Image (tube, grey):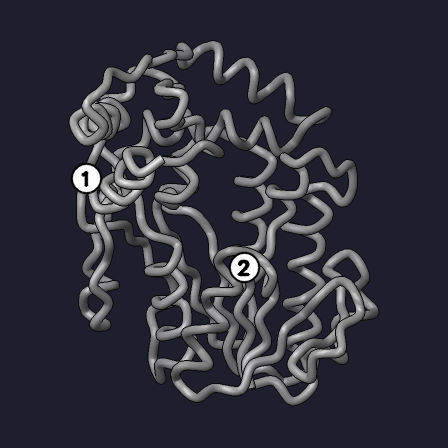
Amino acid sequence: MTLVVGATGELGSRVIGHLRARGETVRCLVRTPSTSRDAIRGDLTEPGSLPAACVGVTAVVATASAITSRLAGVRRPTIREVDEVGMAALIAAAERAGVERFAYVSHAGLEAGPDSPLGRAKLATERRLAASQMRTVILRPDGFQEIHLGPRGRFDLAGRKVAIIGKGDSPRRLVSTDDVAALLATVVLEPDPPAVIEFGGPEALSRNEAVAVAEGLIGLSIKRQYMPRAAARIASRLLARPNDALASVFASGLAMDLVPADWDDAPLVRRGISPRSPTQYLEAQASGERGQ
């Protein structure tokens, strides 16, 4: 049985679908009571709720993060409470329950990027997993296409405006959420997976190049709103305490502009996953815009 933590999120829900398609039994950790036979109540901020969730489990897939709720304005829990302290509690509970495998989602280029609340939490969790006796697998995907090429990432095709931190000329290999989910569901079941898998999509595309592609697809110009690197760095530092999520977003934007994408889609292709490119994602978005 595989326990999925973050089961109601966009990534976690896709992982569940891929695992079930493989015939795996899945248990979902949920924060609110559920009548589903596959769900068990538990919360990363309540360590006492985690041991029962791990009983009888052979593998854990952890995709949960507080950043989405924090960006939506939820005051608590914080990124540190969920992504660092909560994950540490989950790892400890899994170890005590005799879980054999633990798969965790981090970020590509994490050490080279600017300091941020989310980055610190991810690195702390990676270090904790490195010290574990479980067989651990850390996935480090590049940015998700659905975020960085959509309204949440201030890539607004409908409004014809895109925000760019820095110069926007550094190529990235943005990856599909479903491709990340497919890889997670695969490696958590592999007999001998790598300890760390850093990867991205099949196409290297800078922010400026992505805008140019989108302009060609919709046949309209898109306004580019540039934020200097220094301003983003200052904003990330000043917001770290009052708004950990927004501080992490600015740091992520800086990392996208500063950290070379020295990874590719080979880990996906080797496992029979045909990754979707950023251009394919933009084509689908542009088609939707033209159809409105």
How far, Cα to Cα, is label 1 from label 2?
25 Å
Badge 1, how many Cα within 10 Å: few under 14, some, many 20+? some
Tell me the number on the disc at residue 204: 1
Residue 283 lies in what quarter of the image?
A: top left
Residue 19 at x, y = what percent?
A: 44, 78
Q: Nearer the viewer, residue 53 or 34?
A: 34
From this view, report whether residue 159 is shown above or below residue 46: above
Along the horizontal axis of the image, is 68 left or right of 284?
right
Residue 62 at x, y = what percent?
A: 55, 64
Residue 258 at x, y = what percent?
A: 32, 26
Badge 2, how many Cα within 10 Å: few under 14, some, many 20+? many
**Residue drawn at (41%, 73%), measured in percent from left and top?**
185
Residue 146 lies in what quarter of the image?
A: top left
**Residue drawn at (50%, 25%), measured in percent from left and top?**
250
Task: Report whether residue 248 is seen.
Answer: yes
Tell me the number on the disc at residue 63: 2
How many numbered discs?
A: 2
The kind of secondary structure element at disc 1 is loop
- Look at label 2 and name its amino acid: Thr
From this view, report whether residue 66 is shown above or below residue 112: below
**Residue drawn at (23%, 19%), measured in percent from left and top?**
220
The kind of secondary structure element at disc 2 is loop
- Which of the image's four quarters has the C terminus? top left
Residue 86 at x, y = what percent?
A: 70, 56
Q: Nearer the viewer, residue 97 or 8?
A: 8
Of the image marks 1 and 2, the number of the one nearer the N terminus: 2
- Which of the image's four quarters has the N terminus? bottom right
Tell me the number on the disc at residue 256: none
Along the horizontal axis of the image, is 99 left or right of 179?
right
- Look at label 1 and name its amino acid: Ala
